[in-house]
Amino acid sequence: MAKSDDRGTDTGRRVLLLENIHRDAVSVLEAAGFSVETVDRALDEAELCERVAGVDLLGIRSRTQVSEAVLAAGPDLLAVGAFCIGTNQIDLAAATRRGVAVFNAPFSNTRSVVELAIAEMISMTRRLTDKSVAMHAGTWDKSAVGSHEIRGRRLGIVGYGNIGSQLSVIAENLGMHVLFYDTADKLALGNARPCGTLQELLESVDIVTLHVDGRPTNRQLFGEAELAHMRQGSLFLNLSRGFVVDHGALRAHLESGHLAGAAIDVFPQEPASSAEPFVSELRGLPNVILTPHVGGSTEEAQQDIGNFVAGKLAAYVLHGSTALSVNLPGLDLGELAGGCRLLVVHRNVPGVLAEINSLIARHGLNVEGELLGTRGEVGYVIADVSCDTPGALLDEVAALDATIRLRFITLPPALQPR
């Protein structure tokens, strides 16, 4: 694992925010004393490798890929913020090996995605897309044929996480009967009923909606076999990840009439910008709603995400807090009250904390607060020590075989206790 020793000040840090992240994120980071540069688009690997040199914090959304090459090109990088839910666009293993913290926004856009799912269910069951097209063509068709309420319908939720569980509650309040399937044991909310297998769910419901994460095992989760198990005339929604669905198989089941409609917000290949054409096997099909990955794209959600992730990045730099980090142990010792704070990302091997404490004691210093956490191959130590500039101590901690990244925080002179 790479070693990094960061003893610089935490003011004047450089931040690079890509993909038109909400302005509130800039305000939060500038208020924390950081210098922020913004770019309104995604960068490819080559360009990002050039831009990340000298950057301390990187903020992205879903289109920018943070590869091992990018991390290697940014040795000063302390943390990456994914201003979205997913983090599969970041090489988490490489970030962890370098002691780079990763944060995301697992909750901030939940409501927006849920509301879009509900809106699409209603639009398809009422055939609003067909009615709108006919009206624009000058046809007035008040017929109720093929138009239904969602009340009383059976909804099948695949993936009962933050989004799936909130959708469950709202759907039930609308009078739907909710079933769900998840590979992990999840507590059913309200009257929702868990299914033992995916096939059981598919054969039991009128509407199937996917809310799974981006782990590699979910690739092509939904293909010909799964679609064939769905009930005749049912509806299908995917607002999770584009690569989980075989779109060729989905088109075949829509064209045959086996499925009555679909709503798709995510795609296996998505344009990098609005200037690129959108290509999909699902274009041109009736009663199919296609949206450009806008499940979380409401002003409210983007504002919440901007504040949340920027706050996590600032707290990590200023205080060493890793609460809700995706890849490092989640620790928070609060704000530094005095003295200095050692932050050590290390290999998860026995005896590291004892070694650090032995070095602190050897220098005649007192530990005023300390936390240790481990996660997979790494551990993280936060230690508040009664000193101002422990130069020799830092040299010895940095020299430990297990140390991956060492940081040192002290209060600015104006805030030092008198």
Image (tube, helix red, strand yellow):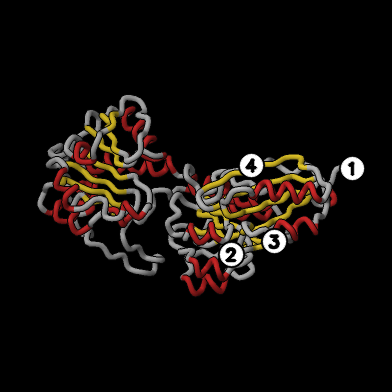
Residue 399, labelled with which disc? 3
Residue 418, labelled with which disc? 1
The quarter in which the N terminus is drawn is bottom right
The quarter in which the C terminus is drawn is top right
Residue at the spot x=16%, y=40% of the render? 142
Expressed as whole percent of the image width and height from the top left, the position of residue 329 reads 56, 46
Q: CA distance from mark 1 to mark 4?
A: 25 Å
Residue at the spot of label 4: 332
Q: CA distance from mark 2 to mark 4?
A: 24 Å
SS of the residue at dot 2?
A: loop
Residue at the spot of label 2: 2
- Residue type highlighted by circle 4: Asp
Q: CA distance from mark 2 to mark 1?
A: 39 Å
The crowding category of the residue bearing disc 4, from other C-alpha atoms within 10 Å (few below 14, some 14 to 19, many at least 20), is some
Expressed as whole percent of the image width and height from the top left, the position of residue 132 reads 24, 48
- Residue type highlighted by circle 2: Ala
Q: Of tags 2 and 4, which is closer to the observer?
A: 2
